[in-house]
Amino acid sequence: MASLADWQEDWAHTLHGVADSSKIVYLRSVTQFRDWLPHAYPKATTPRSSTPRHVHGWLAALVEPGRSDASRLVRLIAVRLWLGHCAADPPRATDGSRR
């Protein structure tokens, strides 16, 4: 089974036409979500097992460290794009075949 990091790496290769600065923010946002998820919801081990409740919980957790509304919105956009990609297209194995 592909790890959350594998899904993110696959998604990163599809971000053509996205400004480099946006890519950095998007990838950082998804990494932060991936890092938070197993602590809050240990059974959510794949993007497909993530629910809106998980994303809302993560966004709420970003309020504590003082993230602005604009920062949380960018993170939400990044995670939505990533989860949408995961739902539509499973990650590729290193040999190019689908996992």
Image (cartoon, rainbow, N blue to C red):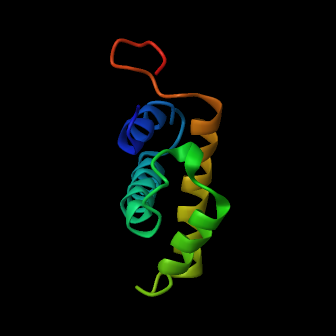
Q: Does residue 54 lie above or below 30 as drawn?
A: below
Name the residue: 56% across, 73% down: 57
As drawn, the residue found furthest toward the left would be: 94
Name the residue: 40% across, 65% down: 36
Would residue 98 appear left or right of 49 to someone viewing this image? left
Q: Nearer the viewer, residue 50 or 89?
A: 50
Name the residue: 62% across, 52% down: 80
Name the residue: 66% across, 61% down: 52
Would residue 24 appear left or right of 89 to someone viewing this image? left
Q: Nearer the viewer, residue 20 or 15?
A: 15
Residue 35, percent from left and from top: 36, 60
Q: Nearer the viewer, residue 77 or 55?
A: 55
Q: Does residue 95 lie above or below 4 as drawn?
A: above
Residue 90, percent from left and from top: 54, 28
Residue 92, percent from left and from top: 44, 22
Instruction: Give the quarter of the figure containing the N terminus.
Output: top left
Q: Does residue 94 lie above or below 59 as drawn?
A: above
